[in-house]
Image (cartoon, grey):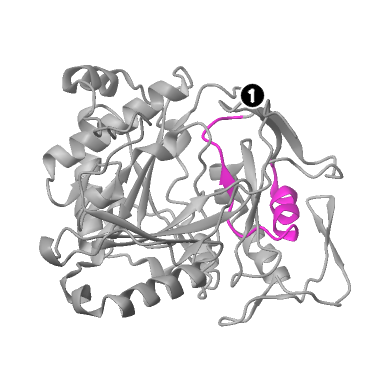
Amino acid sequence: MSPSKTPAETLSIAGTEVRISSPDKMVFPEPGLTKLDLVRYYLSVAEGALRGAGGRPMVLKRFPKGIGAEPFFQKRVPENHPDFIDTATLHYASGTSAEEAVIRDAAGLAWVVNLGCLDLNPHPVRAEDLEHPDELRVDLDPMPGVDWSQIVDVAYVAREVLDDVGLAGWPKTSGSRGLHILVRIAPQWSYRDVRLAAETLAREVENRAPGLATARWWKEERGESVFVDFNQNAKDRTVASAYSIRPLPDARVSTPLTWDEVRSARPEQFTVLTVPGRFADMGDPHARIDDAVGTLDALLALAAELGPAEKAPRAGDGSGRRQSVMPLIEVARTRTKPEALAALGEWKSRHAGLVQDLHPADVMVDGMRGSSSLWYRVRVNLQHVPEAERPEQEELIADYDPWEGRVWPGQPTS
C-alpha cells in the first residue's frame, strides 16, 4: 500500500472505535479500491469471515508497499495492539514461539486491514486449544497446464473419499487458481495425526483418480495434475481463510461455494466488488460448517491399511539429502518473482533449442517461505528433453540467500 497523506478516519464498529490511517490509499488500481473500501468489504461479510478466521491465532501477511511488491509475514502481534485484539502464544518445532493475534469481531477485521493485510491467514486451531486442530484443510493446487475442469473433477473425487470416511467437506475457491475443501473435526488429534489423515486422503484421491490427482510431495514428479497438498496441515502452515481478499489485480476473493456451484463457478467471478452482493442475497454457504464436526478414525485406519508413503531416495554422498528421480536442474534463487521470471527468461534464451521440448509443468517457479518473507526458486525438469541434449547444472543465474544474516536459536555467535 503506497504512502498517502490523507487524514485518518475513525470508524465506530459495534461500539468499538477503529482508526483507519490513510483511508484513501489506493490498494487495487484496476478496480479502484482503496484501503477504506477493503475495510468496508470485510465489514459487509464479517459473519462469514469470522466463521473462518475468528478465534484463531493468525499470521499477519502485510503488504506495506502494495500488491506489486512482496509481502512480509509477521507472526508476533504488534506490541501496541488494542484491547479488543486477543493473543495466543504458539510454540514451534524449531524451538521458537510467537504471541500471535486473535481476532473475534468485526472491529478486529478492520484493525487487521489497517495494518496492510489483505488475506486472513489463521492456524487450524482455536486459541483455547493450540495443540489440537479442529479443521483439516484440503488444498487442491493445480500444476501448470491444468485447467479448471480437472480441478473440479478432483474436488468431487475428494468429496467422495470424505463421504466414505464419514466427513463433510465444505468447498471454497482459493482466490487464486485452486480450490480448498475445509473439514471440521473434533479437537482430539495432534497436528501429526491430522497431517497423516490429510496425507492419507491425498493418497486415496490419487488412487481413485490417477493422472488427474497426485499426492507426490516433490513437485517435479507431479506432471500435469492437481496436487492434493496435505502439508498445509503442518503445524507452521496457514492458508487464506474464507472471504479473504487475495493480492491479484482484480481483488479476487476466496469464496465459499455450495457443492452444486463447484462445477459452474469460476474463481474470477468472486471479487471485492461482487461478493458483498452475493453474501447479502444468499448468506454464507458455510453457515453450518461448525455443526458438521467429524472424526478422523476412518482416515487413520485407512492410513494403517495403506502403510507408509513411499520415501524419496537419498543422495549417496552421506549428506542425507533427497535425490530427485528426475533430471532436474536449478536455474536461480531470487528475492522477488519478477527477478525469478527474468532469470528464467535468460536461461531459456541460452537454451532456446530445447524450450520446445518442455511441458508446462516442467518449468517450476516456486515461492519459498523465508524467515519473514517469500523468496523464489527456479528449476527446470529436463524429463522431456532427449537425454543427449540435456544441459548440465550450471552456475545459478542469481543466487539470493534468504537466510543471510539470520541468527538461529542456540547458534554460536562470533
Residue 390, given in percent of the width and then of the height, sits at: 19, 64
Residue at (61% x, 45% y) in the render: 371
| Residue range highlighted in magenta | 103-126
397 or 194: nearer the eye? 397
* Image-quadrant location for residue 414: top right
**Residue 135 percent coordinates (x, y):** 45, 33
Name the foreground residue: 60 vs 277: 60
In this picture, residue 169 sits left or right of residue 26: left
x, y (%) of residue 343?
43, 71
Give yes or no for residue 238 being in the magenta stretch: no
- Image quarter where the N terminus lies is bottom right
Q: Is residue 202 above or below residue 411?
A: below
Does the rendering let one see residue 386? no
Residue at 13% from the left image edge and 38% from the top image edge: 207
Q: Quadrant of residue 184?
A: top left
Residue at the location (33% across, 67% down)? 266
